[in-house]
Amino acid sequence: MHIKCITVLIAIISFPYILYSQEKDNPFRFEPQFKSTQFDATSIYFINTLSASVDFDLTKDKANVASGGFRAGVDYFSTGTVGGSTNGSPCLDYDMLGRWTIDKDFIRIDLCLGGSYHTASKSYYKDDEGLFLKFGGDIKFKFYKNYAGLLIKFGTSKVSYGGIGLFLGYGH
């Protein structure tokens, strides 16, 4: 499973170079740098999440709209029904994800794919813990630059979750 996650991460990061490798004027350039950090809280029905993440860019386009890199983060979430919690909830996911971003003045879209180490708090779900492939994303509607706004978020790995909420952060 580790090899699959690493292979997927490398593929996501190198995608722009593979796509434009025959072009003389490659629209993407290799420019490693800090992109952003964020804290967010989302909720929908009986699913609640708290997250913290840091994004780093490895490549970006010449117009500074699209970028690719990686995200390191932690997601704490609880899932449930009217009867109580489900899936060993609350759970923690420790993520290392490849990230593709479109960033404009008032909106930012992130799609992520990579590895996630999943832990469950209930003892009878301990067999479900481990490293899993994770796909996720978020759409940020910026109220004040890259510092605060509305967030729509989803993630799917061992347990799927999502919601609508707020983010606070710092970024370029």
Image (spheres, grey):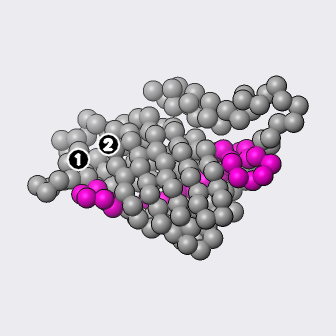
Q: Nearer the viewer, mark 2 or mark 1?
A: 2
* Residue at the image position 58 percent from the left and 60 percent from the top: 107
Residue 86 x %, y %: 20, 48
- Magenta part of the chain: 43-69
Element at label 2:
loop
Tag 2 residue: 159
> In the shown orientation, is residue 69 left or right of residue 74?
right
Q: Sort mark 1 into few (<14), some (14-19) or many (20+) by Cα contacts within 10 Å.
A: many
- In the rendered structure, are the residues bearing label 2 and label 1 in contact, judged by CB atoms less than 8 Å apart? yes
> Height in image: 127 above or below 160?
above
Q: Is residue 41 magenta?
A: no
Residue found farthest to the bottom:
144
Mark number displayed over residue 88? 1
Q: Quadrant of the C terminus?
A: bottom right
Q: In this orientation, which residue lies closer to the viewer: 31 or 23?
A: 23
Image spot of residue 162 (x, y percent)? 37, 52
Q: Is residue 68 magenta?
A: yes
Image quadrant where residue 17 sits:
top right
Residue at figure coordinates x 87%, y 36% from the top left:
25
Can residue 109 be seen in the rendering of this structure?
Answer: yes
Q: Is residue 103 left or right of residue 111?
A: right
Question: Mark 2 to mark 1: distance in Å?
Answer: 10 Å
Q: Amino acid at mark 1?
A: Gly
How many marks overall?
2
155 over 130 or under it: above or below? below
